[in-house]
Image: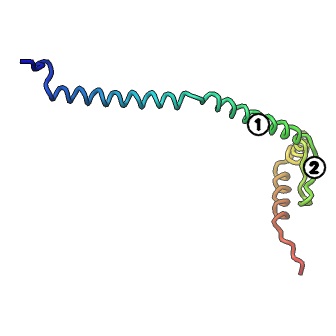
């Protein structure tokens, strides 16, 4: 008899299935590794550099604006103060009597809510 007695037909099917499934997972794993690992550092480094440059530019512009005085041309009652001057105004209004400072604030709020009538 020339029949191979080491493996039955069922065992051959199981082994072939195991090799096929394992090979498929191996191929998918290698492809995923190539896709995820390749080129990511270059793109991330370039994007991080762009974000850093934009952030630094915005911070410089904001720091320059912090020390400036400005009056909004569209709104007559809106002015921008430097931080130092704003703290001086705050201390002058609220530092001694908080009730009086609150009353002034509420008075300005009510004044800003009034609608002018031109009748």
Q: Residue at x 77, y 34 (%)?
A: 53
* Count of numbered circles in the view: 2
Name the secondary structure under disc 2. Answer: strand
Decide if residue 111 is on the left or right side of residue 38: right
Q: Please tell me which residue lies in front, 78 or 27.
A: 27
Q: Which residue is mark 1?
A: 55
- Which mark identifies residue 70? 2
Q: Is residue 93 above or below residue 16?
A: below
In the displayed structure image, the side of residue 14 where residue 53 appears, left or right: right
Q: Position of residue 16 (x, y in %)?
A: 25, 28
Q: Is residue 119 above or below residue 42?
A: below
Q: Position of residue 30 (x, y in %)?
A: 45, 27
In the image shown, does 9 or 105 lie closer to the viewer? 9
Q: Residues within 10 Å of mark 2 (few under 14, many from 20)?
A: few
| Tag 1–tag 2 contact (CB < 8 Å) | no
**Residue 113 picture quarter:** bottom right
Q: Which mark is residue 9?
A: none
- Decide: is 20 above or below 67: above
Q: Residue furthest front?
A: 2
Would residue 35 be found to the left or right of residue 86 on screen?
Answer: left
Residue 54 percent across, percent down from the top left: 77, 37
Q: Nearer the viewer, residue 38 or 79?
A: 38
Spatial CA distance of label 1 from label 2 is 24 Å
Tell me where residue 77 sits by quadrant.
Answer: bottom right
Task: Answer with the quarter of the image where residue 17 lies.
Answer: top left
Farthest-out residue, bottom = 119
């Amino acid at each position: 008899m020339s029949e191979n007695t080491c493996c039955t037909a069922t065992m051959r099917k199981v082994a072939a299935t195991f090799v096929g499934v394992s090979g498929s997972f191996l191929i998918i794993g290698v492809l995923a590794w190539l896709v995820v690992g390749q080129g990511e550092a270059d793109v991330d480094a370039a994007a991080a550099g762009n974000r850093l440059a934009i952030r630094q530019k915005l911070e410089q512009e904001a720091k320059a604006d912090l020390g400036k005085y400005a009056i909004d041309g569209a709104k007559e009652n809106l002015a921008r103060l430097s931080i130092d001057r704003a703290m001086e105004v705050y201390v002058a209004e609220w530092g001694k009597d908080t009730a009086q400072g609150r009353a002034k604030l509420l008075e300005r709020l009510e004044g800003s809510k009034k609608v002018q009538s031109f009748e």
